[in-house]
Image (tube, grey):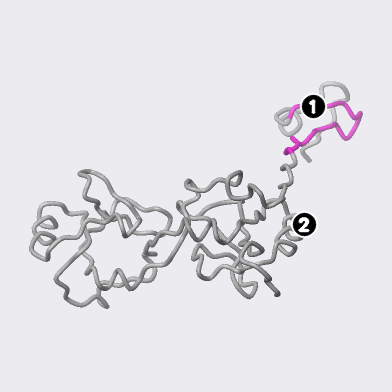
Amino acid sequence: MNHSTVADRYYLEDSRGHVGHNVQFWSKDGKGYTTDISKAQVYSKKEAMSQHDCRESDIPWPTTYMDAKKRLVVDCQYVRQAEASFDEAYYLQDNRIWEGNDIAFLTNVPGTCSEVVAHAQVYSKEDAERLQQITSYLVAWPKTYIDQKTRPTVDFRTVSKKQALAGTGIVLKKPQPLRSPTYRCGGCGVFMTQINYYSCACPRCDTLNRS
């Protein structure tokens, strides 16, 4: 792909859903979706709009805008207590709370957690062990180990399509309204409610449509 300028570079979001608070992007080399923005495919404006025109749920985002929204989080699938070696500083995970697969860490605001590692409170080994003794759901993670396991993602709550696409000339397609299915009697063609269609015979011609 030929990307002539920084302004011509876009990521594509799969807006049909999020993983925790993380935006899903089309990944590099056509390998499905990823929340790790460093693994997201970069498209030209023409390529991104071509895909959006084919499927309106694929949303183009300027890379400069999304890169400025990155934050570092940790996927629980890629950390192991057995791998973590001794450290002088620790983060504490609240094992009751999950943001998708991302670990939630205690912050310096009492009673709050965040999946964003930059918001995590750092504890000494002694303080971490003391808190674990009185609070059963806390898991201590060596800071150095966790810092090596982070990945950059984008929180969908912090982005705005209106702001991101201002001045780009991109106009997104309006989602097609979902149409409710209609139920017509196979015998006489009269319209029926879904409940009546499947639960009883047609009141006009006595046809059993559920069969």
Where is residue 139? Give x, y as percent: 22, 61
Where is residue 84? Give x, y as percent: 24, 75
Can residue 180 be found in the magenta stretch? yes
Frontmost residue, 178 versus 59: 59
Amino acid bearing label 1: Met
Residue pushed farthest top?
204
Q: Earlier along the polypeptide chain: callout 2 or callout 1?
A: 2
Highlighted magenta segment, given as a residue range:
177-193
Which quarter of the rendering shows the N terminus? bottom right
* Identity of the residue drawn at 27% across and 73% down: 145
* Identity of the residue drawn at 33% across and 71% down: 79
Q: Is residue 132 above or below residue 81?
A: above
Residue 54: give its label: 2
Look at mark 1 in the image and give the residue it sits on.
192
Badge 1 local density, few (<14 within 10 Å), some, or many (20+)?
Answer: some
Q: CA distance from mark 2 to mark 1?
A: 35 Å
* Identity of the residue drawn at 21% across and 56% down: 138
Local SS, label 1:
strand
Q: Viewed as shown, does residue 171 lie left or right of 132? A: right
